[in-house]
Amino acid sequence: MGRNNAATLVTVIGGTGFLGRQIVRRLAKDGYRIRVTSTKPLRAYDMRPLGDVGQIALVKADIRNEAEIAAAIAGAGIVINTVGILRPSGGRTFEEMHADGAGTIARLAAKASVERLIHVSAIGADPNARSYYARSKVEGEVLVREAFPAATIVRPSIVFGPGDGFFNMFAGLLRMAKLAFPLFGGGKTKFQPVFVGDVADAVANALADARTSGRTFELGGPAVYTLKDLLVFIAETTGRKRAFWPFPFFLLDTFASLFGWLPFSPVTLDQARLLRKDNVVKAGPDAASVGTIADLGVQPTSVEAVVPSYLYAYRPTGQYAEPRRA
């Protein structure tokens, strides 16, 4: 695609977030006009240089405010919802952000005769999950399908890239843990991390292919790792020699119950529950019907090719020295 897309306005709900920014960058490259919503647009003007002059507009819209979302969608041919939170905060709940908000966007998009709707959910969305996060994600999918049956739903695994909340978080925790680090549940939980740029490419490719309408795609990287694999990789990459010792889930649940409500806690009780479930492509109840990142024409990028380029900040010797292997 190219400049022929200039006639199409895309509204990216929550486009100032970690994933949203990369989607906006890719859509700008493809020539779309883009309207980005944010609860605090004055803090996001650094996004305008991602496109040409006037190509990217910032508007104030809270997913909980129906009038603001309706105004943000008005005149758009495409709507992309990237809103998601990892823990409730600032009065925002999983139900409001992932379920009710998603349903509102889909309903308003249908009312405004929007041509395409892309809804970003997550691998692990499950109506029977113990995690409120996972249940709210699937509730959002149901509401989206009811209001906008032709919506394309994408479920990324853990998304990595500069500024991510997974590899950076664990690198920081490993830096603080001077001798040993706990392996939650023995470190056996499986993950399939996907590069943020690949998710953005998958979304853009879905828009270009009408056959993706009404379908669901799970987006994962080229390899599956256990939690222990990833922690060992982070330790080696950052030059932090650490021992790892098994930490049963019931102890993690106890810790999270006592301290997870604190804003600086590394894990909430809901996140502890999520850690019990594998986060890999086609592991859910609808595995037979979902597509993959390959079906969207994307060759996924490996963790090893990208993550070392931004974890240097956690090395004891800084960015100009080779990390010491554990």
Image: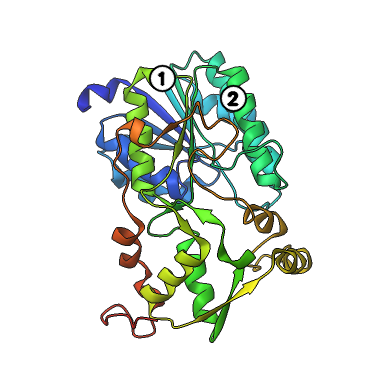
Q: What residue type is disc 1 on?
A: Gly
The quadrant of the rendering that contains the N terminus is: top left
Q: Describe the element under mark 1 as helix, strand or loop.
A: loop
Horizontal side, residue 206 vs residue 121: left or right: left
Residue 71: x percent and y percent?
Answer: 53, 25
Residue 77 circle label: 1
Give the image quarter of residue 265.
Answer: bottom right
**Residue depth check, mark 1 versus mark 2: number of the one nearer the observer:** 2
Residue 146 seen by the camera: yes
Left/right placement of residue 56 relative to residue 121 reads left
Viewport quadrant of the C terminus: bottom left
Residue at left offset 56%, top offset 61% = 188
Q: Residue at x 36, y 58 (%)?
A: 303
Q: Name the element at disc 2.
A: helix
In front: 249, or 162?
249
Q: Amino acid at mark 2?
A: Val
Q: Is residue 270 left or right of residue 192?
A: right
Q: Nearer the viewer, residue 244 or 267?
A: 244
Numbered mark located on residue 144 in the image: 2
